[in-house]
Amino acid sequence: MKNPFRALIVTVALAPLFVPLMAWDAPLGPENLKPQTLCPVMGGAIDSTIYTDYQGQRVYFCCPGCVDSFLSAPEKYFERAAADSILFESVQTICPVMGNPINRDFWVWHMGRGVYFCFEHCIGTFLAEPRKYLDTIR
């Protein structure tokens, strides 16, 4: 007699092996993302001299007052950027998983951020526990 749950168990067991492939082949690629042109807080035109670097992303603002507003609730602004397919400028240089210099061929779009890695296998490690790595991005 066959176990009816065997296929489910095998699927769940093998899923972590395919997470990097799913992230890599996500339908939203860099060609579908737009560069930041508007302030995420007030919606006005950005001033390229007013910015903050946060989790490897350089976020530009229209005025100095918007920096503090952004830093008080950054996830709110990253969620909005993700919904609008906005890609902030990356200033990331180090892989958050391995600590090595990044290779711009290996990246993932995650919660409004373009996150880069040193090797392809780091993508799956990151996606398994993104909160563990987000604050280490530099």
Image: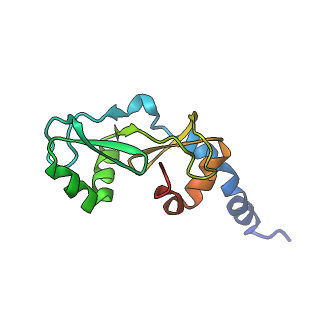
* 134 displayed left or right of 12: left
* 51 displayed left or right of 18: left
Residue 109 in view in this figure: yes
Which quarter of the picture shows residue 47?
Answer: top left
Examine the rendered structure and indicate whether residue 72 appears above or below residue 45.
Answer: below
Q: Residue furthest front?
A: 49
Residue 25 in view in this figure: no
Provide residue 103's location: percent of width, then percent of height: 59, 35
**Quarter that holds the N terminus:** bottom right
Q: Report the number of discs.
A: 0
* 85 displayed left or right of 56: left
Q: Residue furthest right?
A: 1
Provide residue 95's location: percent of width, then percent of height: 57, 46
At 32% across and 53% down in the image, what residue appears?
79
Provide residue 43's location: percent of width, then percent of height: 15, 43
Render colour scheme: rainbow
At 42% across and 51% down in the image, what residue appears?
55
